[in-house]
Amino acid sequence: MMALQEQAVLAGGIQIQNLRKVYGQGDTAVEALKRVNMQVSPGEVVGLVGPSGSGKSTLLKCLGAIIEPTSGRMLLGDELIYEDAWKVKDLRSLRRDRIGFVFQAPYLIPFLNVTDNVALLPMLAGVPNALARARANELLAALDVAHRAQAQPSQLSGGEQQRVSIARALANRPPVILADEPTAPLDSERALSVMRILNRMAQQAQTAIIVVTHDEKIIPTFKRIYHIRDGETHEEAGLGRSVD
Ligand SMILES: Nc1ncnc2c1ncn2[C@@H]1O[C@H](COP(=O)(O)OP(=O)(O)OP(=O)(O)O)[C@@H](O)[C@H]1O
Ligand SMILES: [Mg+2]
């Protein structure tokens, strides 16, 4: 049993050790992350909270292989992906297959309709088009935007665009989801329903999820929260209020 559980922990999950990120050089250098330590188990949804400019987006972008850290270690499951340099050759497939990223601004592809924005990555990963679209529409329904499936992104409200971008991050069923302020433009009911979907995803698919947020509506839902201050993280127990 012990071995099985260890196996499960190794199968997904996130570990970040002594991560540092300095932007720029010399006089204009900004040390956005000084010493970040974080651990997220498969099936867990943790909150990441901190003041504006404290490094939250920087941390998610490092973990999501969008920018390169300066030093430290990062593991996805049992695989060392970064140790003072990238240890993975193909960062593009790491981003595409293993990480679902919800950006602070929803970068939808303007010339694809809503369904195809969500179905695109699974299609690129080899899922037959009809199946990818059916799954996309299921996710859109769960996020309460199915009625906009045929619309172009520019025809959606900010909150609708954000829900589509959440559906897109979930579409490939990645083992890791990184969400930067996913509920900021949403009303309380929709914000909680996004948290319900993320928690369900974590439980059912053993996804490890980090949610950056200032949102007072959703903070009580986390069992564990990391606070980031002056480039360092501090862990705290959350309320873990059920959203079901
Ligand atoms: N590309 C960049 N070049 C230089 N400095 C940057 C860059 N991106 C971010 N920074 C700086 O790094 C620090 C952390 O920024 P980051 O965007 O990670 O903060 P944040 O916690 O996400 O803030 P917010 O809550 O406002 O989104 C800030 O001081 C910011 O000005
Ligand atoms: Mg940010």
Image: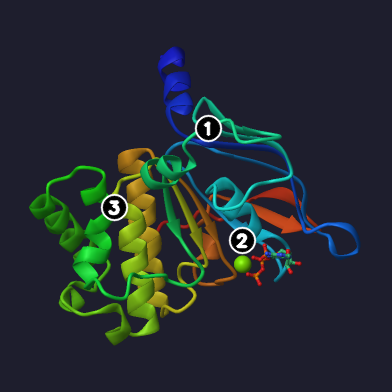
Bin the neighbour count of mark 3 within 10 Å (Cα to Cα): few under 14, some 14-19, many 20 and up. Answer: some
Residue placed at 81% from the left, 58% from the top?
230
Question: Residue 2 vs residue 161: left or right?
Answer: right
The residue beneath circle 1 is 88
Quarter of the image where ligand 2 sits: bottom right
Q: Marks 2 and 1: CB-CB under 8 Å?
A: no
Q: How far apart are the alpha carbons under marks 2 and 3?
A: 23 Å
Q: Can you give x and y, in whole percent of width and height, for residue 158 in the image?
A: 39, 82
Closer mark to the observer between disc 2 and disc 3: 3
Q: Which of the labelled discs sits on residue 57, or is there none?
A: 2
The residue beneath circle 3 is 121
- For the residue pair 89 and 40, the one nearer the viewer reads as 89
* Label 1 secondary element: loop
**Residue type at the position of mark 1:** Val
**Residue type at the position of mark 2:** Ser
Kindly tell me whether mark 2's CB lies below 8 Å from ligand 2: yes
